[in-house]
Every structure is written in structure tokens, then in C-alpha cells.
Amino acid sequence: MAEHMQHDGRHNVGAGKHSRGREEGQTQARIVRPKPVRAVSNAHGEAEGGKSGQSRAGTTMPGVQTDWDPYTAAGFSKVPHDHHHHRSHRTLITVLCVVAALVVVLGVSGYLFYKSAKAVAADASSLVPEATAFSKSLTSGDTSSLQASAEKIEGLSSSMEEETRSPLWSAATLVPVVGPDISSVRTLTSAAHDLSSKVVTPAAQELSGITMKSVFSDGKIDIATVQTLCNTVSKLQPEIDSAAKRVDALGTAKLDQLKDPIGKARTTLDELDAAATGAAAVAPTLPAMLGADGARTYLVVAQNNSEIRSTGGFPGARMLLTIDNGRITLGNFEAVGTHFAPGTIPLTDEEYHIVNDIMQTGATFAPGDVNAVPSFPRAAQLMKWCWEAEGNDKVDGVVAIDPVFLQSLLSLTGGVTTDDGSVVDGTNAAEVLLNKTYYLPTDEQDPFFTEVASLAMNKVMSLLGSVSTADLAQTVEDGVSQGRFLIYMDDTDEESAITALGAEGEVNKDSHNLVTGFYIYDKTGSKLDWYLDMRSNVSEPTVNADGTKSYQVTVTLHNTTTLEQMKNELPAYITGLLPESHNYSMVTSYLAMAPAGGTITDFKVDADEVNSEAEATLYGNDVWAGYVNIYPSATATFTYTVTCAAGASDLSMWMTPTGRSFE
């Protein structure tokens, strides 16, 4: 707009030269017009040679009357047949004058809009770091400065919103090409103002003074403080949701300068909305889950990723966690129970067909195999059944963690030291528990694992109140999103709240938010999966004639061990019994699951040995299952097509979490 303004003031207005008539002797009457007198200013600013005149450049001379018209001046003769020509000339002058006036108005308006836009940009530049500081204060537990920060944010956002509501901005929305972008800016500033006045300020007022220590200290959760937090989030969630929807509805920006800010605003608000929605959903049931209405007992299961299972790993160690009115008491980890008679564990018919007949697991009789089923709520129900069938007291839910998640918690609280002097902390816990333990003599392995797990859990529980709220929230979020921290509640309403938080570990059942899953199970009876490199790739979709979308999916399982390692270096507890009987391979069962409402076709497996491959249905989803042998240094490759319903979201991929990444 600044460029336009540089040119808008340079329009020349003036009449064209008129013919002096025809030469003498022509039959048509000649119009005699007096010559305009050129005005020359004298020393007093008065025009010499008459009362009117113009400079050569067409600009008005100071002190000169400029309303003289050669058509109406005294002594000028009119000829009737030239009347139309005169009127056209006067109309042209009028139009040009109007255009000139419009140009001046637009130029001034453009300049004022430019100044207004700069003011909004300056406020936005100040708002971003202030909002960041507010967020850090809130999540770190340092809430002492929230009120002052909230006042600054509201002042800046109010200024931005007031500026963009002016008529100048309304007019700017009508400008071709950039008009929609101007509207987007107005929407963003309006959303920012609403968030400031209806979310940030109330949050600052209600949460000021609350710290992580006031929520959790000395092994006890303050339920009243937790309830305050949940109630606050519940009240604010509708406003967050409203702002998120308004920003999500914005079109694609034409101006490059707006694309990134709008994209960041969308992402931030969507994430905030999801978190607030989850917190609001859990708020009504959380006090009861924390023992406000009586003691609760939960079964905590450590999933061992070095012996992989569909939901994460072999549930080889378990302990009880009791919480009574917020007070947490931990039991000791103990080994998983003994086997039942085959067919005793209550699988459904389709579960039995897939995990027993096709994948050939021990889930019908072995408590350590029940999470061969890919649904964590179902696996947790089966774990709970096994625990109680062994004669133990009933539990109200199941919590599953793995050593990778435990390591991330220790990185917040600091490490532990075992009786033999081993240090286990936030840098090595996963490797110690998933690999190094198995280099110990066999009779020392379980006691060492139990000691480390118990020490680590007690350390976390005792120091959780001293950690950064932001760091803890990020650690928990990562654990949930990676399937390393999962929760099942026996109460239906409470399980719904856990589902809203995304911590339930359920297979895909939402036909509008599509996820295809690939789950694996160690059939070797070993701890070889520490050496398993698992990767996947999902192609861009192909839109079919009927509107459905098809994706090409590739999954690879690479055995990173060497034959030399398998024969001479790795201990027997890692290689498993009689590894030579299956060519020192990893024997791995798999289950590929289509998303809700989708199908799997063209399923192909390229491996050293392919066994028991079949298609079936599980929980209403199309699946392919079987098992393969992967020799040392070899790779099994699975390729297939996933086709999803028309209008659904893009497809994402879920895989069983392994103990480490090789990428």
C-alpha cells in the first residue's frame, strides 16, 4: 500500500488545447475566443495581468483566482451548434476532479491504514513474548507473576482488537486479493482478545499461588487443589474451544507473512483445546480416582519391551498402588504369576482365533501373554482377571509403564543407587532394565530388576512435587502418545475420562480420525527385541473413483544382531532356549490392523520364513496376522494397501513401542 501511496498524489488535471478555429476564408463561422492570460505573481503574491491564471506545470499559483473559465468569460461568443462540445468538456473536468479527490482520499486512507497495521504488528510483537512468559510461569508452578502478566496481555490484545475494528480495516477487507487476509487478521486479534479476557485473566486470578508442591508433596496429592485446577479448566474450556474453531475456519492466507502466524495459531489452539477438553472430561471423576470417596487400589504393570508384546512388552513385574484421600502407598514389584490351564483365560472367540490360532501365542493360559491382544483396555481386563484369579484382592484399575517412561521420570527426579552400587538414572534406566540386567547370573536378574523398579518408583513418588510442572506435563504427554504410559479404569465413567485424555491405549474405532496399527509379539521366548529395529512408512493417498482413499503401507523389522553375537556373545537369557533350532532368528508374531471402516488388501510379507498368515476381523476391524522368522542381520518387510472411507482424515500409523530407536 505504501508503494501505491507514492504515486497517488501525481495525477495531472487540465483541459486539452483547443483549436483556434478554421483559417479565414472558410465558410463556417469562426469562434473567436480570448486568449487566457498567463498569471504571474508579483512581489505581493498578486497575479499580474489578470485575476486568474495557472503556472506552466499546471499547479495553482499563490494568490490567484482559479475559477476563470474561457467558455464563460466576458466577451466570449457562443455559437449554438457547439453547445454539446462545451458540456462534454465540462463533464470531463468534473470527472477528473472527482477522480483526483478519490485518489487523495485513498492515499490518505492508505497511509492511515499503514500506520494502523504497524501499530497492530508492534502490539503483536510485544504480546508473543508476554504470552510465552505467562505460559512458562503457569507450567513451572511460579504463579506469583501471573496477574501482572495477564494485565499486560489483556492491554495489548485490547489495543489490537480496537485498532482492527475501525472503519479503515472494514474497508480494507474489500480490497481484491488481500481482503480475505485482512479479515483473517481481524479474526486473530478478536480471538486473542477473547482468550485474554475470558481465559488468561480468569486463570491468573484463580490459579495464582498454586504450585507443584501445593498439588503434590510427601507422597500425597492435595485433592482440593487438584479440584480447583480441574474446575478452572472446565470453566475455561468452552472459550478455548470457541477460539480454536474460529481460527480453524480461516482460509489459506495469500500473504506469505500471514501463513506462518495463522498456522502456529491453529496448532497452538488445537493443542490447548485438546488438553482443556481432556482435563474438563476427567474433572468430575478425578477426586474419586484419587481416593476422595474411599481407598482405591491399582495394579501397576511394568511392560518389558525387550520381550515385545502388542501393547508394549512382557508384563513380567507388577505391584500394587493404593491411594486413600490422595495419600499414595506403593507395594513391592513381584514376578508375574504362574500359568493356568490352556483355555482358562477368558478371551473372546475372535481374540482366541487370532492370538491363539494364527499368531500362536500363549494368551489363553499365560498371564504374561494376555497383552498379545492389541487393545490395552482388553489386555488390562485380562491382567486384572489373572491377578484376582490368583487369589489377590480386587483392583480398581491397571496402570502400565515401561522402562523408557521410567527413565524419563528419573531424568526429572534424579537417579537411584542399588545395593551393589549400580547407578540407574535418566540416561541409562532403559538399557539397564531391558538389556544389562540379563548379563547377570540368572538367579540375580529378577531381584535386581525388582530392586531397581521399586527404588525408581519410590524416588519418583517422593520428589514429584519438586519438579517443573511443564517438564512433568511434557513427560507424561510423551509417555501417553508413545504408548509407554497407559491407564485402564474398571469404572465405565472413569474409563471414559481416561479415553478423553488419550491414555487408554485403545485400537482405532473412530472412522473420521483414522489410524492403522501394526502390533508385534515375541514368540522366541527371549530378550532379543532390544536389538529389533522397527520402522514404517505410509504413502500419500490415492483418491479412488468412489471417493475412498488408498494408502501404501510398508513396515520393516530388522534384526540387528549378527550370527557371531548369537552364537558366541549374547547370554542365553537374551538369545532364548535352543536358538539353533530356529536358525538363531527372531521369531515374531504380527498383527496388521486396518482403521475403523477401512480394509487391508494386497498384503505381502518378505521374510526368511513366513508362517501361519491369515486375514480375520478383530473388534470390528479388518486384520492380517501370522508370524515370521527373521535371521540375524536380516529384515522382514510387510507391504499392503489400506483403503479408507471417503471424506475421512488422512491416515496415521501406530506401532508397538520398542525399547529403543535406531533412527
Image (cartoon, rainbow, N blue to C red):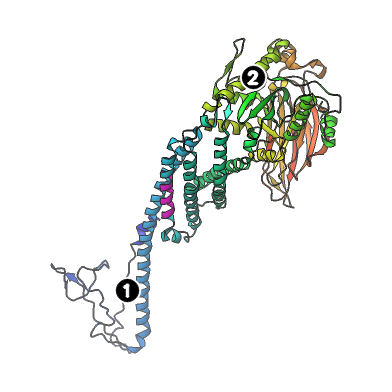
Helix, strand or loop under label 1: loop
Q: Residue at x 31, y 71 (%)?
A: 14
Can residue 232 be seen here? The reply is yes
Count of residue discs? 2
Instruction: Decide which of 218, 573 is in the foreground and name it.
Output: 218
Question: From which residue to which does the magenta span run?
Answer: 152-162
Magenta stretch: helix, strand or loop mostly: helix
Is residue 154 one of those drawn in magenta?
Answer: yes
The 10 Å Cα crowd at callout 1, few under 14, some 14 to 19, many 20 or more, is few
Q: Position of residue 167 (x, y in %)?
A: 42, 61
Q: CA distance from mark 1 to mark 2?
A: 97 Å
User: Where is the N terminus found, in terms of image quarters?
Assistant: bottom left
Farthest-out residue, left: 43
User: Of the residues under marks 1 and 2, which one precedes in the sequence?
Assistant: 1
Q: Is disc 1 in contact with disc 2, using a CB cutoff of under 8 Å? A: no
Q: Residue at x 75, y 37 (%)?
A: 593
Is residue 409 one of those drawn in magenta?
Answer: no
Q: Nearer the viewer, mark 1 or mark 2?
A: 2
Q: Residue at x 30, y 82 (%)?
A: 21
The amino acid pointed to by label 2 is Ser
Q: In the image, which disc is placed on residue 454?
A: 2
Can residue 612 be seen here? The reply is no
Q: In the image, which disc is placed on residue 15?
A: 1
Q: Position of residue 574 (x, y in %)?
A: 73, 16
On screen, residue 361 above or below 125: above
Q: Position of residue 613 (x, y in %)?
A: 83, 32
Q: In the image, which disc is placed on residue 564?
A: none
On screen, residue 135 above or below 383: below
Q: Residue at x 69, y 29 (%)?
A: 298
The amino acid pointed to by label 1 is Ala
Q: Position of residue 607 (x, y in %)?
A: 78, 28
User: Where is the C terminus found, in terms of image quarters?
Assistant: top right
